[in-house]
Amino acid sequence: GGIITQTPKFLIGQEGQKLTLKCQQNFNHDTMYWYRQDSGKGLRLIYYSITENDLQKGDLSEGYDASREKKSSFSLTVTSAQKNEMAVFLCASKQGASERLFFGHGTKLSVL
Amino acid sequence: GDSVTQTEGLVTLTEGLPVMLNCTYQTIYSNPFLFWYVQHLNESPRLLLKSFTDNKRTEHQGFHATLHKSSSSFHLQKSSAQLSDSALYYCALSGGYKVVFGSGTRLLVSP
């Protein structure tokens, strides 16, 4: 088995601040994902990465940057936090186009 | 682009009644994979079901679904709801490496 570790678990930021979320997986999966979870809006894809150093934009990429410098890690940056923003960011990984996703436990973001 | 549409919002049921959560999709891929994920309170989503070939039923933990390409559907069903089935259910579409989710359906089962 494997595990996906997201850090930090809770992130409190100020309006306009750049914030970075990190994700590590030890499944040795090629493909990694970042999703944003908002109540009533489901899981929206921000970025995904098919392999090391690859980046693909999802439907919600505006306002975010991502980085995949190693196969095992995938980081997400909120370029300018929005006031009163509150969401959970979920990292996931899988091996192969037809396979299931494995999820981390999430980073809960609050912006003051 | 790819999209998934689910039964909206909240579905409330009495224990013992059948469950049916709808999922339809749009995709350019001729052989998409459809999934149902379940998320219990304070947990992350985990896989419940994955589609097989067209018109073939897949089952797990009492739930079942059948991919119907003709109607672009992958509805989730269970014959008898249990209290422990109360959770958030997501239908997801995988075409290539991109995976998109529907907006989720919250199922609440009461005694």
Image (cartoon, grey):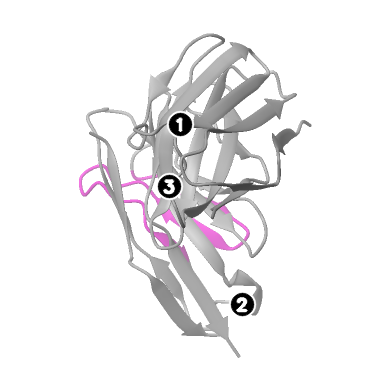
In this rendering, does residue B79 appear at all?
A: no
Q: Which amino acid does label 2 sit on?
A: Gln
Residue B88 among those drawn in magenta:
no
Q: Which residue is drawn at 65% across and 30% down?
A: A22
Position above or below: A23 against B19? above
| Mark number, residue A82 | 3
Q: What residue type is labelled 3?
A: Gln
The residue carrying mark 1 is A79
Q: Residue at x 46, y 53 (%)?
A: A85
- In the rendered image, residue A110, in percent from the top left (x then y), is placed at 56, 53
Name the side, left or right, on which A60 lies relative to A4: left
**Mark 1 touching mark 3, by CB under 8 A?**
no
User: Which subunit holds the residue at mark 3?
Assistant: A
Of the pair A49 and B3, the residue shown nearer to us: A49
The residue carrying mark 2 is B82
> From mark 1 to mark 3, how far is it between C-alphas?
10 Å
Position above or below: A22 against B66? above
